[in-house]
Amino acid sequence: MAKIIQIDFRAQQKKRAYSADVYSHDRKKYRFEVDARSINEAYYEFIGKAMAQGIAVIRCIAIYLGWSCQRSPYQTPVKVWQQYDPAVGSLTEF
């Protein structure tokens, strides 16, 4: 007979710490931190936090793993979204 292995598919992903550098249209840098289950969830939380701070136009978002105080000076971002054409108004993922 075969053994039965139980797997709980209802288990949710664990939250991870993400930090982001958000640059506004006037090249000001804002730094935010969130706990999120995925990088996409973190992205939308960063957008919400930026809007709450009064940032109307976002030029670039660079998302890093971990808290900003633990970030290495040479750490590269996990994902970057950048706006090339302000007329279009959308961010391009890299």
Image (spheres, rainbow, N blue to C red):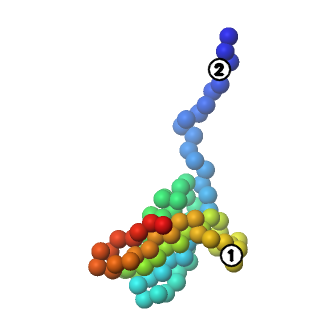
Cβ atoms under marks 1 and 2 closer than 8 Å: no
Q: Which mark is residue 5?
A: none
Of 5 and 45, nearer the camera is 5
Tell me the SS state at disc 2.
Answer: loop
Q: Is residue 22 left or right of residue 57?
A: right
Residue that appears at 58% across and 47% down: 13
Across and down, in percent, residue 31 comes to 56, 77
Residue that appears at 49% across and 73% down: 61
**Residue type at mark 2?**
Ile
Compared with residue 9, is residue 6 higher up or lower down, i.e. above or below? above
Of 31 and 72, nearer the camera is 72
Give residue 15's quadrant in the image. Answer: bottom right
Q: Which mark is residue 74?
A: 1
Q: Which mark is residue 4?
A: 2
Disc 2 crowd rating (10 Å Cα; few below 14, some 14-19, many 20+) is few
**Residue type at mark 1?**
Tyr
Res. 76 visible in picture? yes
Across and down, in percent, residue 57 comes to 37, 80
